[in-house]
Image (spheres, grey):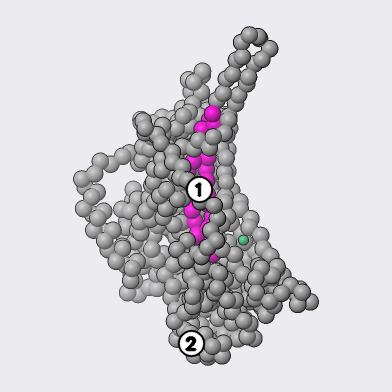
């Protein structure tokens, strides 16, 4: 309900704003605009009327134009026309996965390919919500809670993708529902209700398998709430505030999707699957008076999180946080003064809802200049007495930040542009561990392989990895005007 209200309000606001606002020239690599999402939805709906079709939009984004076409447009700009603007759509149409290309100049579908191979589209928030809800009306699940003495109203559930283990037959588009217990905390991930497996067929939106294997104690709520307001003394040392002041404003400019700072010039866009995309990053060489290219395009291509726990409820946890859940889709609004410093500027983005309509994501990026008090270069010359020559260049940089919260984990994704000419990528991993409930209350009791470390009573931290891969199309020092 909250989602649909938001969409309605949003539609009203763009319809009233667009005709009046100044339209910046569109860059071929710009993310899809709200209007373009609406056109995509209309075009696909027209070809597959929802009255006769089961249609869901799993992904809508820019169909990336050919690199040579983009570069040639840039080199001849503004005399040439930009490459054709197209959207790439992954839709489930009557239980098949379609990969569609929509061309905006023709207002039509120019390619419609049915995917027959392995793999399924990323999940939509709506189907996760719908799947999670099913357990609350499933009698065996209610009985399982009863057996454990748990109150239904304190239970929250999440949809977990199931991985692939070499099966030759496709196992259908399914998720497993894992549930947690609140009852005195908001830190649900510390209170797993173990040993219950609920499998949901997303196409039928029905539970097709249920298993309650054994009763494992739910770890206690005490001491798990992370909210400052719920913390009890003793508190750590209190620090005085630090703020960054730029009395003359920032030294960067944002012109549509183009960001300029110091000698750097780049394009920033957003995608539901991969999050921030940095394109056409180049550095202006003041001596040669020309741009020197550094990177054509860079983004996080996947975040793979496999768990090394062979128990029935854990073996399949091999998450693709970008491909299955959407690194961009899971981006959260940045908290001013906390996620980003006082001198940050914020940008929003749009993603498609399951029905194809645009949803606004406010404060999805922050951009700020960083002076961390570091030294970029220095020298003190003592060999020419009586002079003491000291020359210091402070290290300043520009940071583009996004935070993506994929379930229990929060990824802090930074692209940092440095004056020395390097781009530094950082992914900070924070949030909450995904823990397994256990009968053990002390490590001395453990005489079997538990695939983890006992962190607290009844709480095992399961062994796992986070693999982060980047797509980096580098064009270092290719000279050309951008
Ligand atoms: Cu982890």
Q: Residue furthest front?
A: 234
Q: Quadrant of the N terminus?
A: bottom left
Estimate how packed mark 1 is, as few (under 14), some (14 to 19) or many (20 or more) residues with alpha carbons within 10 Å: few
Report the front residue among 437 and 234: 234
Estimate how packed mark 2 is, as few (under 14), some (14 to 19) or many (20 or more) residues with alpha carbons within 10 Å: some
Q: Is residue 412 magenta?
A: yes
Residue 199 sits above or below residue 142 on the image: above
Picture quadrant where residue 411 is located? bottom right
Residue 377 sits above or below residue 344 on the image: above
Which of labels 1 and 2 is toward the front? 1
Provide the residue designation for mark 2.
138
Side (left or right) of 179 relative to 17 = right
Asked if residue 285 can be seen in this view, the reply is yes
x 59%, y 48%: residue: 470
Asked if residue 175 can be seen in this view, the reply is no
Side (left or right) of 478 relative to 126 = right
Tags 1 and 2 touching, CB below 8 Å: no
Residue 480: % across, % down: 50, 27
Label 1 secondary element: loop
The magenta region covers: 394-419
Label 2 secondary element: loop
Q: Quadrant of the C terminus?
A: top left
Residue 262: % across, % down: 46, 29
Give the prevailing secondary structure in the magenta stretch.
strand
Q: Is residue 199 magenta?
A: no
How far is mark 1 from mark 2, CA to CA? 50 Å
Report the front residue among 451 and 100: 451
Picture quadrant where residue 474 is located? top right
Provide the residue designation for mark 1.
239
């Amino acid at each position: 309900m909250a989602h649909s209200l938001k969409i309605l309000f949003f539609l009203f606001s763009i319809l009233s704003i667009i005709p009046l606002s100044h339209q910046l020239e569109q860059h071929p690599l710009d993310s899809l605009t709200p209007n373009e999402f609406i056109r995509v939805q209309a075009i696909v709906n027209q070809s597959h009327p929802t009255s006769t079709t089961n249609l869901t939009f799993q992904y809508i984004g820019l169909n990336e134009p050919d690199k040579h076409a983009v570069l040639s447009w840039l080199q001849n700009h503004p005399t040439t026309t930009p490459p054709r603007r197209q959207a790439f759509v992954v839709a489930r149409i009557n239980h098949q996965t379609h990969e569609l290309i929509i061309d905006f100049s023709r207002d039509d579908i120019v390619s419609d390919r049915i995917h027959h191979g392995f793999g399924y589209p990323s999940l939509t928030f709506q189907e996760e919500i719908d799947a999670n809800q099913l357990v609350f009306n499933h009698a065996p699940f209610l009985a399982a809670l009863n057996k454990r003495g748990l109150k239904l109203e304190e239970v929250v559930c999440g949809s977990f993708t199931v991985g692939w283990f070499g099966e030759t037959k496709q196992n259908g588009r399914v998720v497993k529902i894992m549930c947690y217990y609140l009852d005195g905390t908001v830190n649900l991930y510390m209170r797993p209700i173990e040993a219950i497996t609920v499998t949901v067929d997303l196409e039928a939106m029905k539970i097709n398998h249920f298993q309650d294997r054994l009763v494992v104690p739910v770890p206690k709520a005490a001491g798990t709430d992370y909210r400052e307001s719920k913390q009890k003394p003793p508190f750590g040392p209190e620090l005085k505030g630090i703020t960054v002041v730029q009395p003359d404003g920032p030294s960067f400019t944002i012109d549509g999707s183009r960001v300029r700072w110091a000698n750097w010039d780049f394009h920033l866009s957003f995608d539901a699957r991969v999050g921030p995309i940095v394109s056409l990053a180049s550095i202006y060489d003041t001596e040669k008076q020309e741009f020197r290219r550094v990177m054509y395009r860079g983004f996080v291509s996947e975040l793979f999180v496999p768990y090394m726990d062979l128990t029935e409820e854990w073996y399949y946890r091999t998450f693709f946080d970008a491909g299955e859940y959407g690194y961009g889709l899971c981006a959260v609004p940045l908290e001013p003064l906390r996620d980003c410093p006082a001198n940050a500027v914020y940008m929003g983005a749009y993603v498609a809802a399951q029905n194809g309509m645009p949803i606004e994501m406010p404060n999805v990026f922050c951009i700020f200049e960083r002076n961390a008090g570091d030294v970029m270069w220095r020298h003190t010359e003592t060999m020419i007495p009586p002079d003491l020559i000291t020359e210091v260049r402070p290290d300043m940089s520009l940071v583009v930040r996004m935070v993506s919260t994929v379930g229990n984990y929060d990824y802090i994704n930074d692209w940092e542009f440095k004056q020395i000419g390097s781009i530094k990528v950082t992914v900070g991993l924070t949030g909450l561990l995904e823990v397994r409930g256990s009968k053990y209350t002390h490590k001395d009791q453990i005489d079997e392989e538990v695939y983890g470390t006992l962190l607290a009573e009844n709480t095992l931290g399961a062994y796992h990895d986070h693999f982060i891969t980047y797509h980096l199309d580098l064009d270092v020092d290719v000279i050309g005007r951008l």
